[in-house]
Image (spheres, helix red, strand yellow):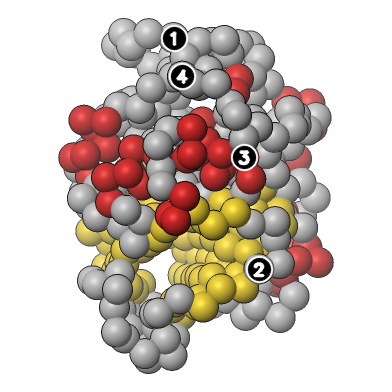
Amino acid sequence: MSEKNPGEACALQLTHFGAAGWRITDGKTVLLVDPYFSRVRYAGKTFGDPDAPVSPGDTRPIFRPQDVLSSDTELVDRHIDRADYIVISHSHFNHCMDMPHIARKTGALVIGTYSTTNIARANGVEEQQLITVKGGEDYQFDEISIRVMNSLHSPLAAKRYFEWGEVPRDVDRPLRMIDYCEGGTMAYDIRWGGHRIVVFGSMNYIERELLDIEATIALVPAARPRLHVRDYTDRLLRRLGLPKLVIATHWDVQTAPYGASQEEALAQAQTFVQEVNATSPDSQVIVPLHFDTVHVDASGHAWKVEHGQA
């Protein structure tokens, strides 16, 4: 753990894994957000779409709701060597399925809903690594504090909202795609070295949960389902106090493997950039590619985006 004073200004590096996944670090402490690398190619109505988008040349197997999922641990291990904290927004597979392997490997503390920690337990994560949250908790750790906020999942097809309850404590292994139910959605307000980082894992929120935050950095999901939420970007940014730095997350087609074209998704994400500029013209706004690292100085200004490789 870092011995840095929690209020001392520091530089941060934020690396985007695709989907809603991130590594945030000050060079000493590492926090992961929804770390997902396996990028399962799926089909079926699990997420409101009859078929998974097809990437040219993608010959990987197609998974359906009743199929068992397993993490691409080799790929995960190429990118994750350590972590101190893992915060999970909700327990869908594209947020949660790679978390148990990472937690076992690193010994990181896992913060998430009852469903999230049940998935971790079922996959061999030690009890002392788990903090189950309901929303409203505000924890002080050695070098950061984390406030947990109740949130909402994105509206899906035809603006319907899909909820399959919770992952039970005694969930059977191995887990199928359908076993990774949403289990409630959380957002996180992270105070770290003079920064206030607000993290969302889905394209929705509960406005009354976002009182008096004055975020300096906001990770805002930016894919098309945000358009099903009234004045999504404008209301959110105003409630967060018009953050200095707005970074798009969860903008990509996550059924496509790393290296596949994201041209259409990137074009759509540019409409989010326009929305941010219209509401908060003084904010920096960044749409990071996979494994890009955003370098943020002590004042909250992004001074470099370093391009990474899968």
Going from N to C along the chain, the mark reached first, 3 or 4, is 3
Which residue is rendered at x = 28% and y = 51% of the image?
A: 106
Which residue in the protein does label 1 denote? 62
Q: Callout 3: helix, strand or loop?
A: helix
Q: Callout 4: helix, strand or loop?
A: loop
* Amino acid found under the numbered disc labelled 4: Pro
* Amino acid found under the numbered disc labelled 3: Ser
Where residue 103 appears, as percent x and y from the top left, is 36, 47
Mark 1 → mark 4, Cα distance in angstroms:
18 Å
Q: Tag 1: Cα neighbours inside 10 Å, few (<14), some, or many (≥20)? A: some
Going from N to C along the chain, the mark reached first, 2 or 3, is 3
Q: Which mark is residue 137?
A: 2
Mark 1 → mark 2, Cα distance in angstroms:
39 Å
Which residue in the protein does label 4 denote? 174
- The answer to which quarter of the image holds residue 82 is bottom left
Where residue 132 appears, as percent x and y from the top left, is 60, 54
Q: How many marks?
A: 4
Q: Which mark is residue 115?
A: 3
Which residue is rendered at x = 66% and y = 68% of the image?
A: 137
Which residue is rendered at x = 50% and y = 10% of the image?
A: 67
